[in-house]
């Protein structure tokens, strides 16, 4: 959090997104709320299909509509209502105030433009007064910032390795000094030693530029390293949120505990993993009550009806679980 | 304990336009019955090629493969068929390794039918047993792959590999495509099966916490070469090769109280096409010296711990 203007940057309230596919209504995001301060990094953790990417895409308003429909909720960036803004204004925000790093560096770049031109494109779109030459110079500077020599400006994506392509994508995302960076599994497609390079770089850039970030990942190791706070997402709902300590040392929701139990410990002695039983629910047919109850070893009748509210078990540590309501953690 | 598989100086080169691509270069190891050898390395290091060459899915360029004490490096088609009943593979991607037009029971029954050893009724009951063994509900018999999630599809792949009661299975990234909660279920299943059936695994993965969890021995590959091989615990406690050290330090640990020193590798990766002799890691290695241009020999530095680096004593 920067001290000069310790202001809230982003506020997501009760966001609900559905995919309408023929007969079915897929409930992808169900009443998600969170806030993000300047300079803060939030980790959105969860498994495939939990709705993490949908949350990020609704902030940028790039969900394909149809089939996606934001059925409710509000998103404020700097106090401005993003969901009800005219599209023309939204375009000045995308890439300028908010930008996104996509998961797969192999497909996110355009194969027929040089990587330098792809960086310069963002700059020229948002800083129209800038001359072609100035944009070129800025793009070269961006390349060097992410550790790629400026001479490679005119090279094409296929001439780079996966790790370097991801660095180009990060350069594009940061070219206009965004206030908010949405990073959707930015290192999942990379090898661990390259991942270490990219994470290291992202952390440095964040410190230098003071960018706020939402990091989407399924890797609890990466979250521990990069994030300030965490929200655990299950079946389109945040089931637990808090700072790193709350989640890693005092994780209370049975799903959070299950996630930690499923990871083989690189240092521990355990012989058997304790996985979560069963499968995630079908988002077109969510169970009544707590979405996790069919897989939960502690489920009681109280879990099977009604919407389970958040309980604040410690300052800033929220848990959506009946047991927590009773104060049993 | 007997070695079920022994591989000596195995090489697999691919001919490409610009020369020879050394995918697997001079790899030697052996596995005892009922044990698991983990093979780790980053993408393109040749670990899948190694697994496939051992199984004769790819023809080896040079070297020897012994299975159950018998030299099987060059076998004719008839013998290979018999051999394949004993050695099987589980593929990485359960989304593309199954035939979309075959139902669950047909897919699992296929190897049983092809073996020509069983009658129709027997195949039916064996298929049911296999589905039960891998934890697939009987109601899924007539389902098709697209109706199932990744975990269930991988269970089909496992059932199919188990059908002819092999002794040895190459598991090529069997859990990489799965979510962690499902991944843990499959890893537990594979360990149970190993115990019950005395299976021997080669477990290929890039995930270091998974490989530590499941393996007895681990071999670390870099650009087709084996740089270090050691009992699993020893490797994590006492990694010696500079590459192994960097690799282990790069893994993000889900623990907020243990901040580890990270070795960030610099430099770009050497091409595996017509590589010069010597250590292929040297270009990224901070300890590189002149002696690294010469071929590195695999030496045993402590019981079972092999290493291909001539400078290991100086850099510790």
Image: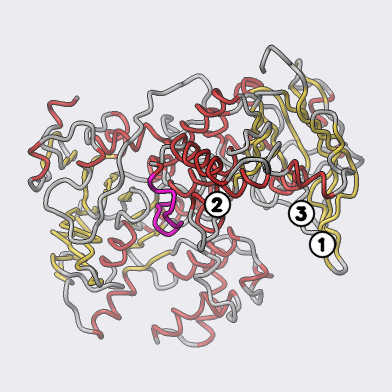
**Viewer-proximal residue, A220 or A301?**
A220
User: SS class of the residue under badge 3?
Assistant: loop
Which picture quadrant has residue B28? Answer: bottom left
**Viewer-proximal residue, A269 or B63?**
B63
User: SS class of the residue under badge 1?
Assistant: loop
Distance between the alpha carbons at the discs numbered 3 and 2: 23 Å
Q: Is residue A226 above or below residue B97?
A: above
Q: Which residues make up the magenta segment?
A: A151-163
Foreground disc of the pair 3, 1: 3
Mark 3 on the same chain as mark 2: yes
Q: Position of residue B122 (x, y in %)?
A: 50, 81
Q: Is residue A270 above or below residue B156?
A: above
Which picture quadrant has residue B234? Answer: top left
Mark 2, residue position:
A118
Mark 1, residue position:
A67
Mark 3, residue position:
A63
Distance between the alpha carbons at the discs numbered 1 and 2: 29 Å
Q: Is residue B84 above or below residue B193?
A: below
Q: How many marks?
A: 3
| Residue at point 39%, 51% (across, down) | B205
């Amino acid at each position: 959090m920067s001290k000069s203007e310790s202001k809230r940057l982003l506020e997501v309230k009760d966001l609900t997104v559905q995919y309408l596919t023929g007969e079915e209504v897929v409930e992808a995001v169900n009443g998600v709320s969170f806030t993000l301060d300047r300079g803060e990094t939030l980790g959105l953790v969860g498994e495939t299909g939990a709705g993490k990417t949908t949350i990020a895409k609704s902030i940028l308003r790039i969900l394909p509509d149809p089939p996606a429909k934001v059925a409710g909720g509000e998103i404020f960036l700097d106090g401005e209502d993003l969901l009800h803004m005219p599209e023309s204004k939204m375009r000045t925000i995308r890439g300028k105030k908010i930008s996104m790093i996509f998961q797969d560096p192999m497909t996110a770049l355009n194969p027929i433009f040089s990587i330098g031109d792809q960086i310069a494109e963002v700059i020229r779109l948002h800083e129209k007064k800038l001359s072609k030459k100035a944009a070129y110079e800025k793009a070269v500077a961006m390349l060097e910032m992410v550790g790629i020599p400026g001479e490679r400006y005119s090279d094409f994506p296929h001439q780079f390795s996966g790790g370097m392509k991801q660095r180009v994508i990060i350069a594009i995302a940061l070219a206009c000094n965004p206030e908010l960076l949405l990073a959707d599994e930015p290192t999942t497609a990379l090898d661990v030693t390259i991942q270490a390079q990219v994470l290291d770089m992202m952390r440095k850039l964040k410190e230098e530029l003071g960018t706020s970030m939402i990091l989407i990942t399924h890797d609890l190791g990466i979250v521990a390293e990069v994030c300030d706070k965490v929200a655990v997402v299950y079946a389109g709902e945040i089931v637990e949120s808090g700072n790193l300590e709350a989640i890693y040392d005092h994780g209370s929701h049975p799903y959070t505990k299950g996630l930690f139990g499923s990871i083989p410990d690189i240092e521990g002695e355990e012989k058997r993993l304790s996985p979560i039983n069963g499968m995630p629910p079908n988002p077109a047919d969510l169970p009544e009550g707590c979405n996790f109850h069919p897989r939960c070893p502690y489920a009681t009748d109280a879990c099977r009806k009604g919407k389970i509210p958040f309980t604040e078990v410690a300052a800033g540590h929220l848990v959506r679980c009946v047991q927590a309501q009773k104060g049993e953690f | 304990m007997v070695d079920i598989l022994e591989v000596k100086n195995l090489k697999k080169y691919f001919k490409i336009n610009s020369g020879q691509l050394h995918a697997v270069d001079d790899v030697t190891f052996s596995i005892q019955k009922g044990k698991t050898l983990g093979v780790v390395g980053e993408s393109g290091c040749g670990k899948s090629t190694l697994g496939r060459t051992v199984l004769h899915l790819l023809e080896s360029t040079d070297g020897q493969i012994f299975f159950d004490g018998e030299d099987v490096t060059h076998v004719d088609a008839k013998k290979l068929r018999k051999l394949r009943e004993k050695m099987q593979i589980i593929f990485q991607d359960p989304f593309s390794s199954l035939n979309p037009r075959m139902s669950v029971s047909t897919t699992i029954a296929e190897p049983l039918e092809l073996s020509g050893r069983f009658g129709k009724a027997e195949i039916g009951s064996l298929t049911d047993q296999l589905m039960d063994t891998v934890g697939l509900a009987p109601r899924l018999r007539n389902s098709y792959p697209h109706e199932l999630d990744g975990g269930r599809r991988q269970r089909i792949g496992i059932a199919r590999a188990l059908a002819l009661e092999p002794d040895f299975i190459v598991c090529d990234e069997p859990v990489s495509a799965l979510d962690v909660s499902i991944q843990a279920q499959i890893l537990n299943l594979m360990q149970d099966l190993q115990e019950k059936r005395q299976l021997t695994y080669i477990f290929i993965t890039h995930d270091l916490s998974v490989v530590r969890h499941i393996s007895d021995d681990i071999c670390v590959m870099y650009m087709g070469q084996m740089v270090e091989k050691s009992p699993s615990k020893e490797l994590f406690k006492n990694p010696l090769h500079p590459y192994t050290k960097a690799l282990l330090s790069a893994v993000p640990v889900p623990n907020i109280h243990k901040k580890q020193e990270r070795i960030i590798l610099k430099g770009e990766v050497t091409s595996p096409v017509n590589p010069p002799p010597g250590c292929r890691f040297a270009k990224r290695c901070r300890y590189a010296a002149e002696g690294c241009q010469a071929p590195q020999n695999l030496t045993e530095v402590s019981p079972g711990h092999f290493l291909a680096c001539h400078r290991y004593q100086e850099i510790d």
